[in-house]
Image (cartoon, grey):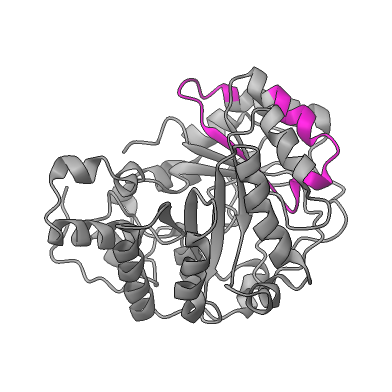
């Protein structure tokens, strides 16, 4: 799919302030806000810039840090909704979060709430998050979301320290009111540099397992920073004898072409515009330039929109259109966002000339 004109998702890191101390935190969040964070006035200007993409408007994800650390969160949610921008929120599992918070999210027309769960037990999850009690708060969050009739999305880290626990975590999630489970394959940035990623071969087996369980899962399952999952899922669906029409109706197909900088854009706490929060190359700053112009015309984003500019194995892969590899992981490994994604074990069957 062509996302060169507008993204599907806009992630805004509202603040670096957060009460957790996660071992893989991309933002290296702290308990206090950054002095250069966008002011409320600048945030309103950002919302107008997002509206400038035109219809269909992208989904705006309020992230952080912890969005609840910003006193103007609900004011900005309301401003986005007046512009008809759909909104999702990713609150941190701290005592600040409550049943009343979810009720307010629903009252303010939030489309979905996303939280993280990295283990099937409190010890496993809190060993990653480094704060006691956040496991129970996350489980409560799922119940509170259900009470408020809000879609509840779960994000899970996939790394050497978590991968063996994924089947047990899946069984836990099956009994929870979850709408979507997204598995984030570690990119070594921020505090994540100190965690061990899984190997390409283990990633391939893990993605095969994800595809297999997704057939009967009571919720949607997807990946973050692992677009190779689309190739794996396609291979599985063909093996299952799925028709092209059924494949085209799947959630995996809906993500074809979506990757860092192409369908996804990230605004940092200080207004810098990145392809994703895991790829620290900026195309500009919303305090000085318009987000639409940065996304459509900056050299960085123009390169990332065009899969024919990919290099190495990704550049000659027949799946480079629907997949395209993790540009963030390629940059972390090589210093070049157009190089091959080292997590992918696939060897292209032929030189791609399309």
From where the camera sits, is residue 208 visible? yes
In the image, residue 317 above or below residue 262? below
**Residue 330 rendering spot, x and y as whole percentages:** 44, 65
Query: Magenta stretch containing residue 57, yes or no?
Result: yes
Query: Magenta stretch containing residue 334, yes or no?
Result: no
In the rendered structure, which segment of residues is drawn in magenta?
51-79
Q: How many marks overall?
A: 0
In the image, residue 294 above or below residue 194? above
In the image, residue 286 above or below residue 303? above
Q: Is residue 335 left or right of residue 135?
A: left
**Residue 50 rendering spot, x and y as whole percentages:** 59, 28
Q: Is residue 197 left or right of residue 94?
A: left
Q: Residue at x 38, y 57 (%)?
A: 217
**Residue 22 rendering spot, x and y as whole percentages:** 71, 68
Q: Residue at x 80, y 44 (%)?
A: 37
Q: Quadrant of residue 285?
A: top right
* Quarter of the figure that contains the N terminus: top left
Which residue is more in the foreground, 237 or 76?
237
**Residue 88 rendering spot, x and y as whole percentages:** 61, 39
Q: Quadrant of residue 319?
A: bottom left
Q: Residue at x 87, y 48 (%)?
A: 35
Q: Residue at x 14, y 66 (%)?
A: 349
């Amino acid at each position: 799919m062509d996302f060169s004109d507008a993204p599907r998702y806009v992630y805004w890191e509202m603040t670096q302030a957060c009460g957790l101390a996660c071992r893989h935190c991309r933002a290296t969040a702290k308990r206090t806000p950054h002095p250069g964070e966008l002011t409320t006035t600048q945030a309103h200007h950002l919302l107008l810039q997002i509206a400038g993409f035109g219809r269909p408007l992208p989904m705006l994800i309020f992230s952080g840090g912890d969005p609840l650390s910003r006193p103007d969160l609900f004011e900005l949610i309301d401003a986005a909704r007046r512009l008809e921008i759909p909104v999702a929120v990713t609150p941190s599992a701290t005592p600040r979060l409550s049943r009343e918070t979810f009720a307010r999210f629903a009252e303010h027309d939030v489309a979905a709430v996303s939280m993280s769960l990295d283990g099937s037990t409190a010890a496993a999850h809190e060993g990653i998050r480094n704060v006691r009690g956040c496991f129970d708060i996350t489980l409560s969050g799922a119940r509170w979301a259900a009470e408020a009739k809000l879609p509840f999305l779960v994000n899970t880290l996939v790394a050497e320290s978590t991968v063996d626990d994924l089947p047990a975590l899946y069984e836990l999630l099956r009994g929870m009111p979850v709408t979507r489970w997204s598995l984030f394959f570690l990119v070594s940035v921020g505090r994540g540099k100190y965690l061990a990623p899984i190997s390409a071969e283990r990633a391939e087996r893990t993605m095969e397992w994800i595809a297999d369980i997704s057939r009967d899962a009571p919720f949607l399952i997807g990946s973050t920073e692992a677009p190779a999952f689309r190739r794996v899922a396609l291979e599985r669906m063909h093996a299952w004898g799925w028709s092209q029409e059924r494949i085209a109706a799947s959630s995996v197909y809906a993500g074809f072409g979506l990757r860092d900088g192409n369908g996804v854009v990230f605004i940092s706490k200080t207004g810098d515009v990145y392809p994703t929060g895991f790829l620290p190359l900026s195309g500009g700053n919303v305090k000085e330039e318009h987000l639409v112009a940065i996304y459509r015309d900056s050299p960085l984003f123009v390169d990332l929109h065009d899969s024919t500019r990919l290099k190495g194995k990704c550049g000659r892969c027949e799946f480079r259109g629907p997949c395209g590899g993790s540009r963030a992981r390629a940059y972390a490994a090589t210093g070049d966002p157009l190089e091959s994604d080292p997590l992918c074990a696939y060897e292209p069957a032929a030189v791609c000339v399309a």
